[in-house]
Image (tube, rainbow, N blue to C red):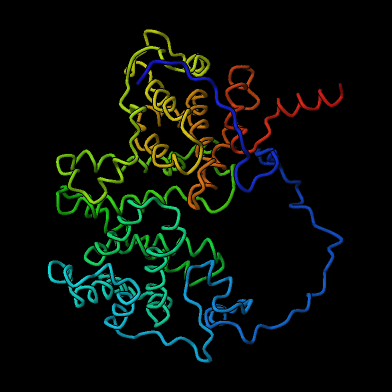
Amino acid sequence: MPSKQTSIPTSHRPMQGQKLVFRVPNYKQKTLPEGGPEETSGQVYHARRSHRKSRAGCVNCKQRRVKCDEAKPHCIRCQKHGVGCEYTGKPIQHSKTNNNIVSEFIKTNPELISIESLASSVSLMMVSDKLSELLRPPGSGKLLPKELTDASAVHRTMQALNHFHRGPAFSDESPDPVRVVMGKMVGLAFETPFLMHSIIGAATTHLCTLLPDNKEYRIAEAYHWQQTINQYSMAVSKPVTRQNMDKLYSACMMISMHSFLQEKFSPRTSFVFSADPAALNWLRLQGGLRYLLQQASQWLPESMWWTVFMKSRDPNIDFEDKRSGRVGLDPDLADLCSITDDTTVESSPLLWPLRMLTGLLPLERGTVSFQKYNTWMGRIENPFFECLCRKDTAALVLLAWWLGLMCYVEEWWVEMRVRSECTAICMALEDSSDPLVLKMLEFPASCCGYLLRHEQERAEVLELG
């Protein structure tokens, strides 16, 4: 990579959904009076607003007991969820046999199971058996809730499969190679229970973000992720081979996505304000794929993910650049990390993360650079994690800069996490007495929309002047 100094980037646009900067109230817990929480007084009760019942709504809305806008041929709610919309007078009759379930899915997605693939690898009976395996209680004999075993559970499973393969949350904005591989994932999952569980779990998790009060989705989500982790843990404990590498890669990426997801904006729950090492697991688990790739490096060009992996590479970025010294680094970030001309990656756990981050800064901001941003968190090693666990200031700032870049990525499972963690770091360090720390916080704060205290005070002085 050419040797050059990188200037500090500035945010050139607000993040989607954020028009104004904000400040989070003090995260320190306030002491309650001895009498307990203050009683609220003067509560005002409002009469319930009258509304028109949706008697002619679609079948899905009626089953969920939610109001339907009755738009045809597809109501807005069904369009948003990526599910079929019907206005028949009778409820949808769910198939009670697995063979009918499989036939329904194949009719919707015929390209996944062609005659050729049936002859060489999969049969309808195998598919039926695998789906049956997913729906039956575990070998322990424990009974599952009816939400996982009744006829509607079968329908939700098929809906989740279709949502993953066809839904806009997983397919519409993905580049062509990713869409192709995700289609192959579904086909591969028919012979791999833990991968099928991870796909159903990921799709159900997204449906939960759309319908957070839906009990059936919540129960299904918990069950499928539990099965994913249990079965994947056993599979990954065995050698990685040419035959199982794509199954492990695919499930690992689904698990990494799920661990990164945070449903609500909540900076106070960040690892920054916690002494629990597990609070950083959302970042630690992102290195799992790197381990698998190392184990199967000799067969990697044969992987169905090979094209996607190659697409994420940038000839201008050398993620293995472990040069000693400050050459090519931003001077302020190098000073903050105490990087000198003699510093090596062995003597400083911050040097390599900083070099990788330096290569990301000039990239176009947004989802277009998402795969390259992911490479950074996938390569972080234990010495840097130890710095984060110690709440080392320079390590936190480096992470905040990466989170700032990720704030421009428009992915449903990314936004809340990166905003919360980036804001938390700004909150934790904004009272620093070191002017360099305050200066280096301005970029991540501008990305997540947080108004630092010294910037707020500066603005107030200017107003008074």
Q: Where is residue 203 in the image (x, y as percent from the top left)?
A: 42, 62
Observer-nearest of 341 and 89: 89
What residue sits 39% from the left and 82% below the top?
Answer: 150
What residue sits 65% from the left and 83% below the top?
Answer: 54
Q: Position of residue 171 (x, y in %)?
A: 41, 58
Write down the quadrant of residue 139 in the picture.
bottom left
Observer-nearest of 194 and 463: 463
Q: Where is residue 272 in the image (x, y as percent from the top left)?
A: 53, 35
In this rendering, is residue 233 above or below 203? above
**Total of numbered circles in the picture?**
0
Q: In this view, does 254 lie to the left or right of 337?
A: left
Q: In this view, does 428 lie to the left or right of 84?
A: right
What residue sits 51% from the left and 71% below the top?
Answer: 215
Looking at the rendering, in which quadrant would you find the C terminus? top right
Q: Where is residue 145 in the image (x, y as percent from the top left)?
A: 41, 75
In this rendering, is residue 234 above or below 115? above
Q: Is residue 370 left or right of residue 290?
A: right
In this rendering, is residue 138 above or below 425? below
Residue most extreme to the bottom: 89
Looking at the rendering, in which quadrant would you find the N terminus? top left
Residue most extreme to the top: 341
